[in-house]
Image (cartoon, grey):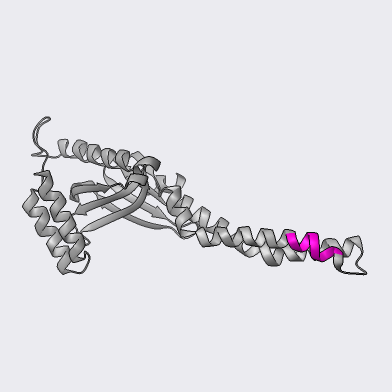
């Protein structure tokens, strides 16, 4: 978290951190995992069946051939897998008492953040498998030009959403003119949210099917 500490402003503190679920990493790298398994199997088969069949090779020469086979067959997929793994580990979704921060990159860092003040609504979707494995999609509707920040297959999505809403609520209590404790915290009514999603549809950010699905969900919450 050393790099994150450099991003925090005065009086800012992290309250929750998560990342993409391992199922997302596996899904993106399934072909690479299969390639690595096939490469290891090919290297073992070459070592067991091919090398002993080559006449005239000393034990030292056979060892050199085995090392070359491992480098040629296994090294590339193994390095690629490790690189993707550390990229996945480096991506973090952090909630502070002031904003939501998305960090990514191993050597070159990319930072995207949204002020909690601009967060108008938070929506979460979990499939049946997502509920079993504790991952889901979290969508933040903001007042910025981007409009929507989407976090796909986030680990512990319910805790992520709850921490964000709690941090926003605490921030609003400290702002001038904020509602008192126990008062309604609803900043955006359902018709306003539908209008925002309609604008995102018109901008091409959402498809017509996504817009209709969100509209249906919002009307069902009334």
Residue 113 against residue 56 in the figure, above or below: above
Quadrant (top left/top right/bottom left/bottom right) for the N terminus: top left
Quadrant of the image occupied by residue 83: bottom right
Residue 39 against residue 138 in the figure, above or below: below
Is 159 placed left or right of 30 in the picture?
left
By secondary structure, the bulk of the magenta-drawn segment is best described as helix
Is 209 placed left or right of 163 in the picture?
left
Identified at 87% across, 65% down, the residue is 61
Can you give x and y, in whole percent of width and height, for residue 195 in the image?
A: 9, 59
Camera-nearest residue between 127 and 161: 127
Can you give x and y, in whole percent of width and height, for residue 191 in the image?
A: 6, 53
| Residue at the farthest top position | 182
Can you give x and y, in whole percent of width and height, for residue 213 in the image?
A: 18, 56
Residue 10 seen in the current view: no
Identified at 27% across, 47% down, the residue is 99
Identified at 23% across, 57% down, the residue is 148
Identified at 15% across, 35% down, the residue is 173
Quadrant of the image occupied by residue 175: top left
Is 221 placed left or right of 126 in the picture?
left
Camera-nearest residue between 151 and 176: 151
**Is 147 included in the stretch rendered in magenta?**
no
Can you give x and y, in whole percent of width and height, for residue 129 in the image?
A: 37, 46
**Is 48 included in the stretch rendered in magenta?**
yes
Residue 62 seen in the current view: yes
Residue range corresponding to the magenta coloring: 45-52
């Amino acid at each position: 978290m050393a790099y994150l500490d450099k991003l925090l402003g005065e009086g800012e503190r992290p309250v929750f951190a998560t990342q993409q679920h391992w199922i997302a990493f596996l899904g993106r790298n399934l072909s690479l995992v299969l390639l690595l398994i096939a490469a290891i199997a090919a290297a073992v088969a070459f070592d067991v069946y091919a090398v002993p069949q080559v006449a005239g090779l000393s034990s030292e020469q056979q060892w050199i051939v085995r090392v070359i086979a491992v480098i040629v067959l296994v090294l590339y997929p193994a390095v690629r897998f490790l690189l993707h793994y550390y990229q996945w580990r480096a991506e973090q979704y952090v909630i502070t008492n002031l904003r939501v921060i998305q960090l990514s990159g191993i050597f070159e860092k990319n930072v995207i953040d949204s002020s909690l003040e601009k967060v108008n609504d938070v929506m979460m979707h979990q499939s049946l498998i997502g509920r079993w494995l504790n991952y889901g999609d979290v969508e933040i509707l903001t007042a910025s030009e981007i409009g929507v920040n989407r976090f796909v297959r986030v680990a512990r999505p319910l805790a992520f959403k709850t921490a964000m809403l709690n941090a926003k609520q605490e921030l609003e209590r400290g702002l001038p003119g904020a509602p008192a404790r126990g008062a309604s915290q609803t900043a955006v009514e359902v018709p306003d949210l539908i209008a925002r999603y309609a604008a995102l549809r018109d901008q091409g950010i959402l498809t017509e099917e996504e817009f209709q699905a969100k509209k249906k969900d919002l009307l069902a919450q009334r």
